[in-house]
Amino acid sequence: MIYSRLAFCAVGCALAAIVMSGCQTVRVRTFEMSRVAPHPGEVLKVDHIMILADVTGSTSERNVFRQEKSLLKAFVAAMPDLNYQMGFRSFAGGSQEDWMYVPLQTGTLEDLGGAAAGLRYLGGTTPLHEGVRVTGSEFEGRDGHAALLVFSDGRTHPHERVLKACEEVAYGHMGELCIYTVNVGYSKSGKALLEKMATVTGCGHAWQASEVSTPEGMEAMVREIFFAPGPEPEERTMVLPSEVLFDLDKAVLKPEGKAAVDRAVAEFRKQNLDYVVIEGHTCDLGSAAYNMDLSQRRANAVRSYMIEQGVDGGLITTEAYGESRPAVPNSGEPNRKLNRRAVIRYKFVD
């Protein structure tokens, strides 16, 4: 009898756990964010961004609205303080006159912060398609790179109408438009819709609220939306004639040679260096072995002087070519003078 009661209690507890898990409220996470700045090598890719927030009836359930507002406030707090246009809308089942609205314009982070802090639940059915159309109309006729960020639980029907609205918004924009979504709800159907929305233009992303509910997760989302790798820096070249740098058949820098290298060092100080390569070259007078040794000693002399001037020696390498790589044919003294040279190749980090 005791065992049967225990078994009954165990089954009852299990059923209760299942029921309770099905009705579990969304956990509200609040955290502070500061402005996200680009990493070295990153550039701002967004010219315009509109944020769309769902404040319809379904968000009143299980703390969805509270979680959405918390994430929205964190996102706006983390938005980079750079030169792009930004705006905001909320949407609900009532009149559009009640929807919160900050028009797309430059330098409105303060206004967006106020809108996020003052976001109100309005209720009603979910006209997500209408919210997308109205918000997306801000992009019409603009070019550049645009982002539409949607906070919603995705609980609306039919889905096709929403996806059609996304296509129309992309068509009206003259440049690239990426749609990003954050699912703040718990509906499998809503999750599927928000994921589809993020694929309409081929460059968006869909997040679950749990993925961006920490400072690290939120920063990662902000970086994906706003930043992209910058163009790869190009290698630059500086050619210095040997007679400027050295006396005939010598590998000791002359005063005018030091002045020439000083100009190179001044260029290096303008940005962060990635590397410096010093090539030594000679004409064809003398043996090949001798010319190879001379070109190496001269390249080493330039490297040593650069280090004395504060350039990190770990960034500088030397290459000796002797007479093997003439710039022009060694057909006379004027050409031979051009072949006696030091070539400095360098590249900046960004």
Image (cartoon, helix red, strand yellow):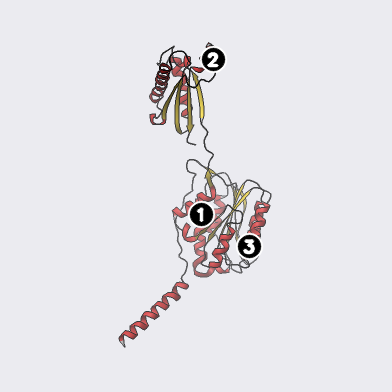
Using the image, determine if residue 341 lies above or below residue 213: above
Point out which mark residue 335 bears: 2
For residue 303, what is the image quadrant? top left
The secondary element bearing badge 1 is classed as: helix
Query: Callout 2 environment at 10 Å: few (<14), some (14 to 19), or many (20+)?
Result: some
The kind of secondary structure element at disc 3 is helix
N-term-proximal mark, 3 vs 1 = 1
Disc 3 vs disc 1: Cβ atoms closer than 8 Å? no
Q: Which residue is mark 1?
A: 75
Residue 257 in the figure: left or right of residue 158:
left
Q: Residue at x 58, y 49 (%)?
A: 108
Query: Residue 268 placed where, x, y %?
Result: 47, 28
The residue that label 3 is drawn on is 162
**Residue toward you, 339 or 27:** 339
Q: Earlier in the sequence, mark 2 or mark 1?
A: 1
Horizontal and vertical percent for residue 346? Answer: 48, 29
